[in-house]
Amino acid sequence: MKELLLSLALFLHRSARYKATKTFIKTLLFDTNNPYKRYFDLTIIFLVVSSVIILIYEVKNPVPLWLDNYDIYVVSFIFAVEYLLRLWVHNDISKMLIKEYNDAKFLGSEFCFYAVLKEGLLAKLKYMLTPSAIVDLLAILPAYRPLRILRVFILFRVFKLLRYTKSINQFVDVLVNKKFELLTLLLLLLFIVLTSGIAIYILEAGINKNIDTLFDGIYWAIVTISTVGYGDISPVTSVGRAISILIIVSGIAMISFTTSVIVSAFSERLSELKEDRIIEQMNKSKSFMIICGYGQMTKMFFRQKRKNIEHYIIMDTDASRVKSAKKDGYIAIQENASSHKTLSRFDAKYCDITMLCLTSSDVENIYITLNAKSISRNIKVIARVNDPETIDKFKYAGANELLLPSLVANTMIYTAITQPTMYKAIHAILTGKSIANIDEIHVHTSHTMLGKEVKELAFTSNKLLFLGIERNGKFIFNPSQDMRIEAFDVLLIMGRKISLDYFKLQHEGDIQVEK
Amino acid sequence: MKNKIAIFGYGNHGKFIAKGLLEDGFDVTIIESEKHFFKDAKNDDFEKVILSDVTKDSELKKINLELFSQLVCVMDDEHLNVFLTLSLRSLFKDSYILSISGSLNVTQKLKMAGANKVIDLYEVSANKIYNILDKPIATRVLEDFVNNKSGIIFKEMIIPKNSFLDGIMAEDIDFSCHGVLLVGMIDKELGNSFTFVTAGISHKLDIGDTIVCLGEKKELEAFEELIKKEGNIDENCYYRGR
């Protein structure tokens, strides 16, 4: 038996298909990046909603047999499969067995097969006892026909939906954080309910016709302490009424206390919850920008309004700056971008992230650059450099592009003094005025421009100025008229935006060029 | 007088600008109110360095600033810079004043104070971010042009008397066979605004117009000499594809 199970574990461990299947199921159930998860989730939601509708409908109307069968067999069957799959992917017993076996062989010690098996099974059992697993199990139960009472468990299917609502999880999270306070309150409540319930039973059973059993007493205590007060049971003796007074007063105190505990727990974590939401949205957008620091540079960046930046988040450590960013209508959070924990909340694996390090401190900017690059080399970093002497350090840190505001400004002043005419031209070019737009055309391998001579492209008649070609990292200025365009060339062309767009369109092959 | 420039402030920006101007043969005078910056300027071999309290009009009057073609306010202290711009404007009505600004509010204040041109420290840089995001290669190449890193620069030239360019339509000619590209021009007839060659407006070049070209420094200088000459249009070169 032991050998058989071990060889089975070995077989499974070696089977690539088994592993692939398990990984797929796991991502299907848990990983939001799995493209099929969406459909899976929608199916489950549909099943839940439909079975609840059937349950409500059948209270007063006869349900056709096929619908009943659908409810009992199809829905429950799928839920059962889902339950088993979740149980299956929860942990990997075969892997544990193989590891233990190898370790034992290596150390020459005895291989404790059953201990490992027990450990693995215990982990599964532990999973089965988690609230979500219990809900899953209860959602299958209504399939058992002989007990009609189990139909009520269909309502547990609704709880399955909780898996898909993040806010409930956050609510539970908040409550868990206040576990100590809430537990204390609960114990106190239990104590009061039990003592007063017992007291009323002892004092009024037999006298009060409504109090017959201990359960009646406790029921009365709960109805009273919660300030619901149905009035179906009420004390008739003076002592009973005195107990009522006590229980009502303490009930009010307890309710207000509980409310305040929960409210304070929420307000404590409100900003954090909001941040989580923002970051989650960013990760969903797949391509976004993280802007570090809300100073002059960032303000100027947004003011330019060159194009609509849809997905971005501003991070600043300073609360007042974050506040002013929010006031200006931008999405901002108070976080430290140089902390590994903060940046690793962003999904660098699946998203296209651009970091703008725009704080006024070079030390900070370098640190943020390093931090971003240590999380993923794929994060594109554009860093502001204040002191030109630190340029090398930024390059070592891995910044993709550098910005030197003071150098740029100095060059502009210098140009403005020495060549005032050109200043206007350069300023227009650098600030991307539409008339002086400089654009690049990347020639791909199936581009219609490929192999053509420069003169064939007729830049002048298209009212464009051809500046040159970037080829293999080198810029060829003003190439000769008979130079041929090669694949992966980047053509730099200046002109009005409409001329450029039209030119690009022509050479994408959509419009025939008139000769 | 043409190349006489007064620079107020020898801090972060002043240093860079003053040195560049000196190299290009401008007559630079540095005015500083801080002693250590004054010493720096002296140590950097500037001949005309004046230590003066720029907040006092009497001190400013002593410098004969009306003799300068441009007054450049690049003090490190923003408040002082605005105050200085205001003082200069009130004292010298006709001077050309250029100021640097570190924030949007200051830009506005400087303009109100009467600066002819205000250069915002962050405006061009902020735009550069957009450029990097959209067209990284074009941005790098352009940056190299402007900072003279690749050897290719912008240059403006005035069409001299008797030049063969006089009377020619700008859209008909092609300078690329001389290794330079015509980027744009200032036409005296159309006011003093700059027009890009790509704007699609027909332009007749006249004597006194300024043209802005892009090219290697050597080629640009050769071309500047060339346009001084009278002569005929080189048929192979000037008319592109016609």
Image (tube, coloured by chain):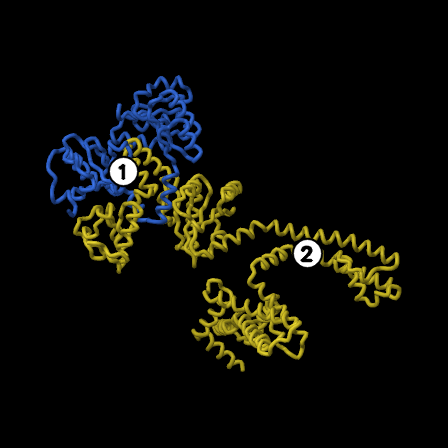
Chain colours: A yellow, B blue
For disc 1, the chain is: B
| Residue named by callout 2 | A182
- Residue A192 visible in the picture: no
As drawn, the label of residue A373 is none
On-image quarter of the C terminus of chain A: bottom left
Residue at 29% x, 38% y is: A425
Q: Secondary structure at mark 1?
A: strand
Between residues A409 and A420, which one lies in front from this camera angle?
A: A420
Is residue B4 shown left or right of residue A480? right
Q: A261 left or right of A352?
A: right
User: Quarter of the image holding residue A416?
Assistant: top left
- Give the vertical position of B79 relative to A65 (above or below): above
Q: Are marks 1 and 2 on the same chain?
A: no
At label 2, the amino acid type is Leu
Q: As drawn, is A202 to the left or to the right of B78?
A: right
In this orientation, which residue lies closer to the viewer: A387 or A172?
A172
- Picture coordinates of residue A35, whole percent (x, y): 45, 65
Eyeballing the image, is A346 above or below A141?
above
As drawn, the residue found furthest toward the front would be A61
| Whether residue B46 is situated above or below residue A478 in the rendered picture | above
At label 1, the amino acid type is Thr
Which x, y percent locates residue A183? 69, 58
Residue A451 horizontal/vertical position (percent): 20, 57
Screen quadrant of the N terminus of chain A? bottom right
Which residue is denoted by mark 1 in the rendering? B195
Label 2 crowding class (10 Å Cα cut-off): few <14, some 14-19, many 20+? some
Q: Secondary structure at mark 2?
A: helix
Q: Residue at x 65, y 57 (%)?
A: A179
Query: Is residue A266 visible from the viewing direction of this image?
Result: yes
Q: To which chain does the residue with label 2 belong? A: A
Depth check, front residue: B227 or B199: B199
Left or right of A167 on screen, residue A235: right
